[in-house]
Image (cartoon, helix red, strand yellow):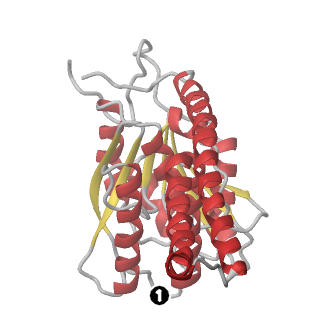
Amino acid sequence: MGEQLSTNQAARPGASDTLLRIAVLIPCHNEEAAIGKVVKAFARELPSATIYVYDNNSTDRTIEVARAAGAFVSVERLQGKGNVVRRMFSDIEADAYVLVDGDDTYEAASAVPMLDMLFSEGIDMVTGTRVTSIAAAYRRGHRFGNAMLTGIVRSIFGNRITDMLSGYRVFSRRFVKSFPALSSGFETETELTIHALELKMPLGEIETPYRDRGEGSTSKLNTYKDGARILATIVALVKDQRPLQFFTISGAILFVLGVGLSVPILIEFHRTHLVPRFPTAILSTGIVLLSFLSMVCGLVLDSVARGRKEAKRMTYLSIPASIIRR
């Protein structure tokens, strides 16, 4: 491959005289203290990029500060980061998308190597994996929760990610315009990751410095509530994407429970040839039947899921790739 082209003045395949359109997407809720610095930092690092701030019902001066810093500002009334991401992905047309939080915790300079990796290697999603020595920036509970949830997803969908909950990512147009965006809150990062893993998209990761929020900026993440929502999202996506695995496990649990209830009854019947506990016998029979029904549902839904996966893959392939040859 020939000489590498710069990220901000790169050509699309077959159109060497056409500048790439880079969009920086910043979802915001009450980030008056930080959003101006974030917009200016990305404008400095990516001077040809267009910066979009989508405000999510802020009650402070986020909109005024973002607009004064030079960003294009829009409003999404449905509360939740997932709703904002869905709106941004729907509204904005570009060749590459940089998604970053508006709290000034991520390093804007990391966007350049992330974009270079995206184009030079033909990758669909590059994740900025967080690296920090600041305890307040990445609290122990958040580290543990991220490691646990990432580990669950890695074990089910593929061992290709290390920081599933990072809010700093770069996407190809192919990814953005084929992403269904069904979640509403902070679980959107989980949905982004599983979508890429399930379709076996080319992925990349680059370490990026992660710092604490500045003075006047407060986190909107509720460790336990949002952690539970993310876990529920993982379970729901396993059910949707891997129904055979999901319903086989649930069927096996029901089968073991049903057999366990029947063991004392069988022992008593072998000893006395009597069945004195009819309700328990009927219950165990029903549970075992439900276990087989669960497995049958898994087989049927697995065929449906395969068809849905093929349709999503065809939608993904219908969008031209943005690859910069070097």
Q: Is residue 199 left or right of residue 158?
A: right
Question: Where residue 26 sits in the image (x, y, percent)?
Answer: 56, 59
Q: Is residue 66 left or right of residue 216?
A: right
Is residue 218 visible to us here?
no
Task: Please name the amino acid that badge 1 sits on.
Answer: Glu
The answer to which quarter of the image holds residue 315 is top right
Q: Quadrant of the C terminus?
A: top left
The answer to which quarter of the image holds residue 120 is top left
- Residue pointed to by mark 1: 215
Q: Residue at x 42, y 68 (%)?
A: 149
Q: Residue at x 40, y 22 (%)?
A: 11
Residue toward you, 152 or 81: 152
Q: Residue furthest front?
A: 272
Q: Is residue 256 left or right of residue 146?
A: right
Q: Residue at x 62, y 69 (%)?
A: 65
Q: Residue furthest top?
A: 14
Residue toward you, 153 or 100: 153
Task: Find numbered disc 1 in the image and state the secondary structure of the residue it sits on.
Answer: loop
Question: Where residue 271 sits in the image (x, y, percent)?
Answer: 50, 81
Q: Quadrant of the N terminus?
A: top left
Question: Where residue 167 sits in the image (x, y, percent)?
Answer: 46, 62
